[in-house]
Amino acid sequence: MSRARRTVPPALLVLVLAALVASGIRPYDRLTWLLETVWVLVGVPLVLVTWRRFPLTTLLCWLLAAHALILVVGGHYSYARTPVGDWAREAFHLSRNPYDRLGHFAQGFVPAILVREILVRRSPLRGSRWLAPLVVCACLAFSALFEMIEWWAALAGGSAADDFLATQGDVWDTQWDMFLALVGAVTSLALLSRLHDRQLPALAPGVAPPHAADVPVGRSSRSPEP
């Protein structure tokens, strides 16, 4: 096991847990904090429980940690009130705090590598040209599910859920959220697939080599064309 494999995941875990605890100290709104950070509260124990049977690549660990930090910051301040978003609004003369746009971009960017890792290691899609399209579809499906959760929260909480929704008066907020998740997923696959392919064989012997996605389903990379 490389030094990075030994040190990076524990260090990222400590960082995420420290940020989570800090974000829970006097947040802007306790319910909003809980709704925004629930993915971290559930995700961290799930990764720990499954780590022995399904350890993650270092790349995916970095991405999950970054996404967790985005969520806990948004949970502490609420997405419409994050200081970095207020700075961006003033610096670029925007009409709204754009932090939630970053959050929904990450909602596609990070899960794309997570879904890709699961499918490559646990499904027949290894080496398939369908891998990338299905990863994008999975990310869009998750984004749509999250929008439905926001809808249910609005029905249940009324105005109390406004900080969780973070629409900031934009009637097209739901469409923007899903579009940005789509852009995030496509961008992630375009930028990180090669790096991901280089890390996968160390965790899953027999995983297809880099760029094996050019091989059609059911055909070996050594098989001649008919």
Image (cartoon, rainbow, N blue to C red):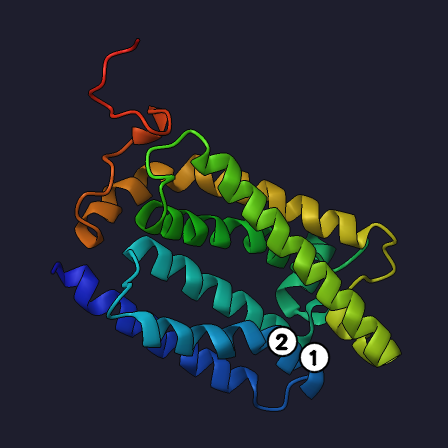
Residue at image coords 70%, 52% = 177
Counting other residues with Cα less than 10 Å from the Cα at mark 1, is it few (<14), some (14-19), or many (20 or more)?
Answer: many
Q: Which residue is mark 1?
A: 32
Q: Position of residue 69 (x, y in %)?
A: 49, 69
Please state if 75 lies on the left or on the right of 205 as rendered: right
Q: Position of residue 80 (x, y in %)?
A: 74, 67
Quadrant holding the N terminus: bottom left
SS for dot 1: helix
Q: Which residue is mark 2?
A: 75
Taking the view exactly as shown, the residue that stands out farthest to the bottom is 26
Please state if 26 lies on the left or on the right of 112 as rendered: right
Task: Give the residue type that dot 2 points to.
Answer: Gly
Counting other residues with Cα less than 10 Å from the Cα at mark 2, is it few (<14), some (14-19), or many (20 or more)?
Answer: many
Task: Give the residue type that dot 1 points to.
Answer: Thr
> Which residue is at the front of the view, 217 or 82?
217
Q: Position of residue 99 (x, y in %)?
A: 66, 60
Q: Which mark is residue 76?
A: none
Q: Position of residue 195 (x, y in %)?
A: 30, 41
Task: Examine the rendering and report whether any part of residue 26 can be seen.
Answer: yes
